[in-house]
Image (tube, rainbow, N blue to C red):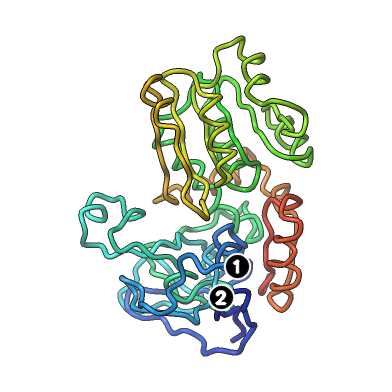
Amino acid sequence: MKAAVWHGHRDVRIEEVNRPAASTGHVVVSVRYAGICGTDRHEYVGPNFIPVEKPHRLTGKTAPLIMGHEFSGVIDEVGEGVVGWKSGDRVTANGTLSCGQCEACRSGRYNVCSKLGFLGVSLNGAFAEYVEVEAARLFSIPDTVSLREAVLAEPLACGIHATKILGGVQGQDVIVTGPGIIGLGVFFAAKQDKARNIWVMGLGKERQSLVESGGGVYFDLNDGDPVRAVADWSEGRLADVAYECVGSQTALDGCVSMLKPGGKLMVMGVFEKPPLLRMNDFQEGERRLFTSQAHTDEIAEALKRIASGQIPAQRLITREITLDSLVRDGFEELLLHGDRHIKMIIDIGG
């Protein structure tokens, strides 16, 4: 089968590799669409997480590895012991890999497993014609959701999960920095949780119509001081909640400055170098810091919201490429023009 294999820094090769077989408790999915995640882009110019010399703590694998963990497709083969799934079922999946034995796993929080791994980073993933997946991680795609739309369920689930961690945002004033797929997923999650006001901050006006049509306020950071703008909009109250979805020092500092005393900061961005956190601002104002790691079962909720029209999935897909053109039209395009894209997807067999 054809697959995108990570060998090293800016070295992803489209190769012919062996098709996986379904082991006990697993299925093999014929991949139709795959999504390029921010993590995949980091790995392309990294490495950050793909093990190169030391084998992964859970899987024992090292590079080269097939990339990709966001995907949709059709079950092609069912392994021994799998119940409730059959060939031909339309599915997506949670790409989390966990041990099932540590305290976090036993409590249902397998997304923070002590040996946490991911498809496409710690084990062969979905930038391929076929991928092997644990049956327990599968989600059925509703009939009214296309395979093309369903590829968005995984990143959208991150916003739903983060909002749950905060205890909800109903009736609160919310800031979202970074209008990529994670930030927009947060925006829709907060809106559906009945936040009072939601301000989305980003560079440029490409996301303005999408945010405003969804009932939010968009602020182009080129237009002035966001802290002053939020203070004006909120009549001096500032924000109850701020989501950092960029992974930059500037965005982190801005979020802290826009939070009222007692406010909550949710950090979701992936930082390429350790950030500095203004702890005095947290201590003096009793502000609270939260973090979020992927999701657990929220993909099911994301699929329901796509099916109901609460999330305009098609508008979030800004480019569609092929597996053969992944490096040139995918990774290199994102490095040059990342701000133009919300979600780039790969048509593998659609």
Q: Residue at x 63, y 61 (%)?
A: 147
Q: Residue at x 40, y 26 (%)?
A: 280
Residue sitting at the far top: 235
State the image quarter where residue 231 is shown.
top right
* 224 horizontally vs 194: left or right: right
Give how far apart the Cα atoms at labels 1 and 2 are.
Answer: 28 Å
Q: Residue at x 32, y 78 (%)?
A: 24
User: In which quadrant of the rendered image does the N terminus lie?
Assistant: bottom right
Residue 141 vertical position relative to residue 193 in the rendered view, above or below: below
Mark 1 or 2: the one toward you: 1
Q: Residues within 10 Å of mark 2 (few under 14, many from 20)?
A: many
Residue 99 vertical position relative to residue 220 in the rendered view, above or below: below
State the image quarter where residue 190 is shown.
top right
Residue 45, label in figure:
1
Q: Amino acid at mark 1?
A: Val
Q: Position of residue 85 (x, y in %)?
A: 42, 68
User: In which quadrant of the rendered image does the C terminus lie?
Assistant: bottom right
Q: Position of residue 7 (x, y in %)?
A: 55, 81
Residue 65, label in figure:
none
Q: Nearer the viewer, residue 279 or 170?
A: 279
Q: Nearer the viewer, residue 118 or 51?
A: 51
Residue 23 vertical position relative to residue 254 in the rendered view, above or below: below
Q: Residue at x 75, y 72 (%)?
A: 328
Residue 30, label in figure:
2
Q: Position of residue 249 (x, y in %)?
A: 55, 42
Q: Residues within 10 Å of mark 1 (few under 14, many from 20)?
A: some
Q: Amino acid at mark 2?
A: Ser
Q: Position of residue 124 (x, y in %)?
A: 47, 76
